[in-house]
């Protein structure tokens, strides 16, 4: 994250995905985030962050 402009949309989209699916695939994460454009960074770290958060949530259950 650099400017943070996209962060709220990314978080809402990621939370919406994780409410529906607790262990989404990478493709499902990418699909869920597709409506949010980040002009600062690549999407790789964002996708990895959502996957890591999903895994941590699952481990905490
Ligand atoms: S961090 Fe700037 S638009 Fe995503």
Image (cartoon, rainbow, N blue to C red):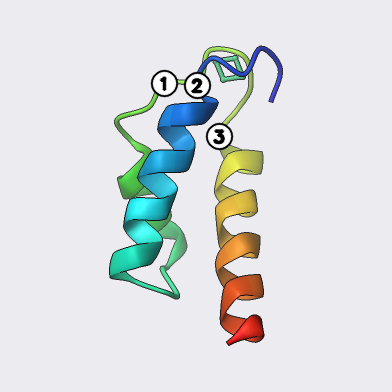
According to the picture, the residue beneath numbered tag 2 turns out to be 6
Residue 27 vs residue 37, the one in the foreground = 37
Point out residue 53 in the picture as x, y percentages from the top left corner: 62, 62
Q: Residues within 10 Å of mark 3 (few under 14, many from 20)?
A: some
Image quadrant where one finds the N terminus: top right
- Measure how far apart labels 3 and 1 are at the Cα level: 9 Å
What residue lies at 42% left-to-right and 74% top-to-bottom?
Answer: 22
Q: Secondary structure at mark 2?
A: loop
Does the numbered disc 2 mark a residue whose Cβ is under 8 Å from ligand 1?
A: yes
Identify the image quadrant of residue 7. top right
Q: How many marks?
A: 3
Ligand 1, by image quadrant, is top right
Q: Are marks 2 and 1 in contact (CB under 8 Å)?
A: yes
What residue do we see at 40% from left, 63% from top?
18
Residue 37 percent location from the top left of the image: 41, 21
Instruction: Classify mark 1: helix, strand or loop.
Output: loop
Dot 2 alpha-carbon crowd within 10 angstroms: few under 14, some 14 to 19, many 20 or more = some
Is residue 28 visible in the rendered image? The answer is: no
Disc 2 vs disc 1: which is toward the camera?
2
Residue 4 visible, this orientation: yes
Q: Earlier in the sequence, mark 2 or mark 1?
A: 2
User: Residue 60's x, y, as percent?
Assistant: 65, 82
> Which label belongs to residue 43?
3
Cα distance between the residues tagged 2 and 1:
7 Å
To which residue does mark 1 refer? 37
* SS at badge 3: loop
Is the residue at mark 1 in contact range of ligand 1, meaning its CB lies under 8 Å from it? yes
Q: What distance separates the C-alpha of mark 2 from that of mark 3?
A: 11 Å
Q: Name the N-terminal-most of marks 2 and 3.
A: 2
Q: Earlier in the sequence, mark 3 or mark 1?
A: 1
Can you say whether 51 is above or below 32 in the image? below
Mark sitting on residue 59 = none
């Amino acid at each position: 994250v650099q400017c943070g402009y996209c962060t709220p949309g990314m978080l809402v989209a990621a939370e919406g995905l994780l409410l529906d699916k607790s262990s989404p695939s990478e493709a499902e994460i990418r699909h869920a985030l597709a409506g949010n454009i980040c002009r600062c960074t690549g999407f790789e770290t964002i996708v990895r962050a959502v996957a890591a958060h999903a895994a941590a949530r699952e481990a905490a259950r």
